[in-house]
Image (cartoon, coloured by chain):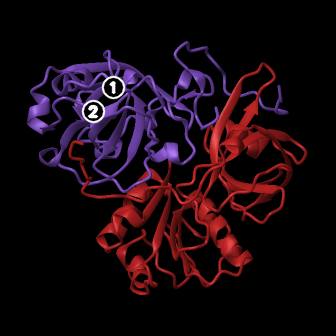
Amino acid sequence: MTETFTPPTRFAVPGRIAVSNRAAALWQTATLTEIRRETPQAATFRFAVPAWAGHLPGQHLMLRLTADDGYTAQRHYSIASAPDDDGHVELTLDHVDGGEVSGWFHTRAEPGDEVQVRGPLSGFFAWPGDRPALLIGAGSGVVPLMSMVRHHRARGLDVPLRLLVSARGPEELIYAREYGAETTPVFTRSAPEGVPVGRLAACHLAPLLAEEPAGGWEAYVCGSNAFAEHASRLLVQAGQPVDRIRIERFG
Amino acid sequence: MNVTRGFTGRPRVHHPGLPPGQYDAGDDWPVLSAEVTPDLAPADWTFRVDGLVGAPRTWDWDEAHALPGSAYEGDIHCVTSWSKFGVRFGGVSLDAFLAAVRPDASATHAVAYSHTGYTTNLPLSDLTGGRAWIAWEYDGKPLAAEHGGPARLLVPHLYFWKSAKWIAGLRLLDHDEPGFWEQNGYHARGNPWEEQRYAGD
């Protein structure tokens, strides 16, 4: 046997859970049942998926739209709802400028419409609710993290969980009504009276890292690539081990 | 066919280079990696080929650059459904590295591993014959860290999660051994033209 190389750093391998290959491979019909406005740019789309195999918070699905000439468009979307939402999944989508799929959702979709989905997919970003979780998201990057928060509440888990969520201003803060004591919002452009305005910084992380639970935090970072780079570097600089940081980048 | 009411899609020009289920990302080059981007200077970068080979070897930055240069100009395809046309990478053909280590006849697969600990598996036949590179230039400039710089594996005929960023080495094996995303539900090979996205596809 030749000598084997050990990388100088190891990130979190393997993934947290086993993924059902069968569920991942199968397209299913999802029927839109409800549309809820979250912010001027974002809305939540609730689907009935009767044969949904169940998911863990942090997983995503692939969604496919088909035009009448057979043309299809497919995209990955994080699942917003908690796992215990029997036969339903929710997605929260930003209206992307010129977005082919998000544009259809925000301008054409109505309850009763059918789309195709497959999943849940990928186990890497999944959080089964077993380890203390430090969640850091920006914009619609909060979507998979909200699934974790909802799961935490629905199951009455006592494992520590904290959420730092960055938005340009209060009116763009997705799920604003749902946050509780676990959440610290960070506003980058405008904030309510008395709340400072500024980018996510070391001073936001310090108190959370200072109250580190036994066994340490598992950090979950989700947002644009620029935000993910910024937040993950702050975490590393603050001493969070690199192999305890999971990143989902919205490219 | 499950037609979506009211969905027409964007105006389409048939592009023969676009695999099924993909769209043209244009000038965008989304960054998709699960781990923290490492601070890896060229002086600290090494590339090793070991496992079922006659002469395992590690190259440093200067030694790798002393090999004959080789460029790729063509398209890349990400499993998240974007494709990018006409990209230009510069580096060295993997054939040059493999020739130096003399792979055993029994070697059929490889695990590519990164300086971050990321892994991905490939049939050896996908890495030979001028179809794979160690790349350190993009569009004539040093490859950016968030895209895998100082050097990444480049296997453009497979989905791009196979083109391991911050490449550290290849281990040649006589069997297939799933890597990071493959253990997380992705397809073992990842051919975009056959839409091999997830295990079971």
The percent coordinates of residue B181 (x first, y second) are 49, 45
Q: What residue type is labelled 1?
A: Ser
Q: What is the crowding at mark 1: few (fewer than 14 residues within 10 Å), some, or many (at least 20)? A: few
Q: In which quarter of the image is the C terminus of chain B?
A: top right
The answer to whether the residue labelled 2 contacts the one labelled 1, judged by CB atoms less than 8 Å apart, is yes
Residue B106: which disc?
1
Towards the viewer: B88 or B1 = B1
Q: Which of marks 2 and 1 is nearer the N terminus?
A: 2
Give the spatial CA distance, label 2 vs label 1.
7 Å
**Residue located at (58% from left, 81% from top):** A159
Q: What element carries label 2?
A: loop
Residue A212: which disc?
none
Colour in which chain B is drawn: purple
The percent coordinates of residue B190 (x first, y second) are 51, 30
The percent coordinates of residue A138 (x first, y second) are 52, 62
Residue B52: which disc?
2
**Residue located at (79% from left, 59% from top):** A36
**Residue located at (21% from left, 42% from top):** A2
Residue B138 seen by the camera: no
Q: Are marks 2 and 1 on the same chain?
A: yes
Q: Quadrant of the N terminus of chain B?
A: top right
Q: In which quarter of the image is residue A97?
A: top right
The percent coordinates of residue B64 (x first, y second) are 14, 32
Question: Pointer 2 indicates a residue of which chain?
Answer: B
Q: What element carries label 1?
A: loop
Colour in which chain A is drawn: red
Residue A87 seen by the camera: yes
